[in-house]
Amino acid sequence: MSDLPGNFPGDLPDNEALEAMFAAESAPDPQARLWDGRARHLTFLHGLGGSPLTWENQVAKLPPVGIRAQAPWLRGMRPAANETFDFSAAAGDLLMNLQLEGAPRTAIIGHTLGGMVGMQMAVDAPETISHLVLIGAQIRPPAAALKAQKMALKMTPRSRFEAMGVSKNRVASALDMIATFEAGDHLDAITAKTLLVAGERDRAGRAAAEHIAANIAQAEVFIVPGASTEPMNENVEEFNTRLWDFLGVEPHTY
């Protein structure tokens, strides 16, 4: 489930622009009062070592009206923040924000760590999550895989993370928390329509997707051709086509 620097797109803007770029909100659709099963509110959650800019290729295609969307930092992962990462706290923070916003439900699109937080939200507040799109998510990564990730993290220069606007210390802290993830024991509580996504070249991700899908009532698996651990940026067209179809969203065309 590796998504450490090296899998990131280059030339990313600095983090001062994040909120303006990705707290995208378009005019609410008055027809949304009667929910028709289509996603009206989207929450994009970045992965371990990622940032809100992970979703640039998806947010840019949101329709100009009818959809509200956000791509926040996970609690404990913003470089300048004081708190540490914790699954329950990160999920609770997002659920509280939805309540304050007055959004009755949201669709979660989460990459690796963000997908795990999405599962936590769907277990803690099933009625709040309309759709789950989990990309490269795992519930019990093998100890050998976690050890390999920690070694890769240790060998990655701090400057590589800083160039991406990401804190190496926060990535390391979150990686240590992976073993504490407990929502994977309660997948039967998830009622959201769920799509598990993995890249064709991500063997571990494909196996995890099949396992998770087998334990969620309304789940299906989509394998992105030619992609590895970051299919939303490695095969944007295939990923976006399936994403918008699953969510019932008509993408913006230029």
Image (cartoon, helix red, strand yellow):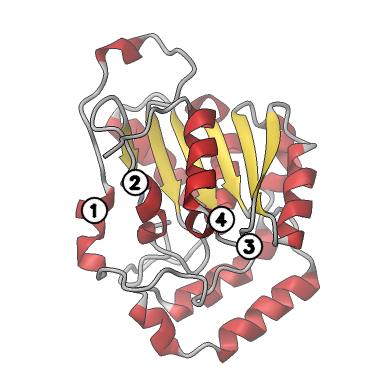
Q: Quadrant of residue 148?
A: bottom right
| Residue 223 image offset from top left, x and y in percent | 68, 47
| Residue 133 image offset from top left, x and y in percent | 56, 40
114 vs 227, left or right, is left
User: Residue 151: in sight, yes or no?
Assistant: yes
| Residue 43 image offset from top left, x and y in percent | 41, 41
User: Residue 130: in sight, yes or no?
Assistant: no
Q: Residues within 10 Å of mark 2 (few under 14, many from 20)?
A: many
Q: Which mark is residue 2?
A: none
Give the camera-side residue of 121 and 201: 201
The residue under label 2 is: 59
Q: Residues within 10 Å of mark 3 (few under 14, many from 20)?
A: many
Quadrant the N terminus occupies:
bottom right
**Marks 3 and 1, the one that precedes in the sequence:** 1
The residue mark sitting in front, 3 or 1, is: 3
Q: Determine whether the residue tagged by mark 2 lies in a helix, strand or loop.
A: helix
**Marks 1 and 4, the one that precedes in the sequence:** 1
Residues at marks 4 and 3 touching, judged by CB atoms closer than 8 Å: yes
Which amino acid type is marked by label 1?
Answer: Met
The residues tagged by marks 3 and 1 sit, at their Cα atoms, a distance apart of: 26 Å
Q: Which mark is residue 21?
A: 1
Residues at marks 2 and 1 touching, judged by CB atoms closer than 8 Å: yes
Above or below, comparing residue 187 to residue 142 in the picture: above
The residues tagged by marks 2 and 4 sit, at their Cα atoms, a distance apart of: 15 Å
Q: Which mark is residue 228?
A: 3
Q: Determine whether the residue tagged by mark 3 lies in a helix, strand or loop.
A: loop
The residue under label 4 is: 231
The residue mark sitting in front, 1 or 4, is: 4
Which amino acid type is marked by label 4?
Answer: Pro
